[in-house]
Amino acid sequence: FPQKQTPGPKRALHQEDKSGCNPLAETGRSKLQNQRAALNQQILKAVRLRTGAENLLRATTNNKVREQALLELSFVNSDLQILKEELEGLNISVEVYQNTGETFSIPLIPLGLKETKEGDFTIPLKDFILEHYSEDSSDYEDEIADLMDLRQACRTPSRDESGIEMLMSYFIQLGFVENRFFPPTRQMGILFTWYDSFTGVPVCQQNLLLEKASILFNIGALYTQIGTRCNRQTKPGLENAVDAFQRAAGILNYLKETFTHTPSYDMSPAMLSVLVKMMLAQAQECVFEQISLPGIRNEFFTLVKMAQEVAKVGEVYTLVNTAMNQAPVKANIPYSWSNMAKIKSDHYKALAHYFVATLLSDHQLHPSDDEDKQEKAWFQLHDCMPEGLTSLTILRDKVQRKRLGKAHLRKAIVYHEEALRVCGLCKKLRNIDILQEILTVAHKRSLIKYAQHEQEDDFLSLMEASSVLPKTEHKVEMIVPEFSKVKVKDFFERLGPLPVFSAKQRWTVPRTINFHCQERGLGFTLKGGPPVQVHCLDPECSAALKGLKEGDYIVSINGLDSKWLEVNDVLEKFKSMRENDIEIKVISCQDTMHNKSATYSVGMQKTYSLICLAMEEDKIHETKKATPKLSFLSWGTKNRQKAASTLCLPYAVAGSSQTKKKMDSRLTVLDTESSLY
């Protein structure tokens, strides 16, 4: 927080350069996002109908009515299934997010942004400012409008670094808002609604943490869209893509570890773990493309390196595919995504076997070659050798090299055919022309090479090629989000320093004290700051007789805000008014509201999933005696224990023996530079 500085009374729009994309712009991405918003509304309507039919089915005993309710349920469920498939189609519309230039790369999968409903926080925030901070809420209309404008802009962020910065700014700003306006013992009456990115089902909570978690998800999603947009035919483009996917993985992992109980499927720990794996796999894929961008030389050691690098890509996609097919993720992850992971796993494993077959068939061990070096490199390629053969035997024997090379080619062809088969079974992937073309070209290349070495007695060959051991010299890792690099100014800093003026502190209404300096001084000392606190108050001084109390905080001096002033600044103001009457406004701390964790408190807000948009406050009193449960959306305990409360206020030194002591003669001179009077 700034020191020795008082914020101005009014500010212009804080986020002059923070504006989202035009939601009406006819771009491919905006069209997809508009379609997503329309589908969300249709899903909401269908879920409401299903809930009504289920309630009717439970309530009625009339057989005819039950039959009608069952028929309605059947219709609504089929409608929901169709809508879910349409939403899945939007999630696999990868061509829109790819680079617009000509490319010959397998498409990468981006995440779609979560949609939210428009909201207006004006009335709740103004009421809280008046009630809690005892200030004129109309003075903060500009700040509230800036917050609303920033939230609206975050619904359509631009697909670049400025969009990321805007979302991060709003996320940090929400931290300020949470500390200033959301006390741990009551609700603010603000309902946040966000739609699940995969199912389209709305989730509603009176919990600001839902807003923060959803913004984090959108930051990760925007990073994935930036990564898919990079030009993967250039080295800088691939470097940017790797960086973007690593940052996306870091954001999603931060979301998983920070928000431990999430109300929607797309932000559940299991789903986020899969998404992190998928982003790191796509980063590893871009690393391989970066290595192979200059071209792959048909040289022994180069082919060994490339075989292991591409085998690493196949391995990570195998792990992604396995994770996607585990419950409960399998029921909600787009079917085409798991197929894409399977296709890439088989495709890159096939390339690894093709590279090994090439180094065996196209290269022979010559007397001038380093035999030990080649043997060591070959040994690192496999975890086991064919029965009865050693690495050196394979390298020296031309017949064995050829036989093993053909075995690797057969395995490559099997993997290529499996990738093509899975691609053909998925309607969404079957329509991606570039994917079909790349898989077909790679398959034909392996077939042509196999045909060059095919012989009539091949059916007698029983040699089986072992798997290629994955290894990479460029392992990708998550990049932890660096929120501290984004400079954000608290919209509501005029309320005072956040460690003191927060929603957890309760204050008295400001009291006006009119007093004048006596010959022996003011009659009290100052400490702390900002804001400064009254200390060592003489009960017989003018200020004490007018109502000043030990431990009071000075928030105004002669009508000027002093919440941000240090002790020396307040002293200077008192010195300038020593011959005149002084008017100050002071407040006293009543108590500090504590909670065991950042979100757990009595009367915890409820989580509204599906369509439960109505308030259920009347049920809170009935459930107070029950064992309290954690909210669906809460901070991880280990991450929030230390940050659960704000800084404690300094204690005033209050004692009858001390206040009755005669003040030191040194404190009677008003011109002293000391902080004591």
Image (cartoon, rainbow, N blue to C red):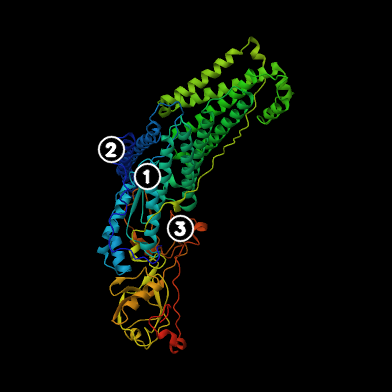
Q: Secondary structure at mark 1?
A: helix
The numbered dot on residue 163 is 1
**Residue at the spot of label 3:** 630
Residue 144 image offset from top left, x and y in percent? 29, 57
Label 2 or label 1, whichever comes before in sequence order: 2
Instruction: Name above or below for residue 274 compared with residue 586.
Output: above
Q: Residues within 10 Å of mark 3 (few under 14, many from 20)?
A: some
Label 1 or label 3, whichever comes before in sequence order: 1
Residue 561 image offset from top left, x and y in percent? 31, 70
Q: Secondary structure at mark 3?
A: loop
Looking at the picture, which amino acid does disc 3 mark?
Leu
Residue 189 seen in the current view: yes
**Residue at the spot of label 2:** 25
Q: Quadrant of the C terminus?
A: bottom left
Looking at the picture, which amino acid does disc 1 mark?
Gly
Most extreme residue toward the top is 456
The residue at the point 51 percent across, 28 percent down is 293
Q: Choose top left, top right, bottom left or bottom right for residue 370.
A: top right
Q: Secondary structure at mark 2?
A: loop
Q: Choose top left, top right, bottom left or bottom right for residue 381.
A: top right
Q: CA distance from mark 1 to mark 3?
A: 33 Å
Q: Nearer the viewer, residue 289 or 187?
A: 289
Q: Nearer the viewer, residue 3 or 207?
A: 3
Residue 260 seen in the current view: no
Label 2 or label 3, whichever comes before in sequence order: 2
Instruction: Name above or below for residue 97 compared with residue 630.
Output: above
Front tag of 1 and 3: 1
Residue 279 image offset from top left, x and y in percent? 48, 39
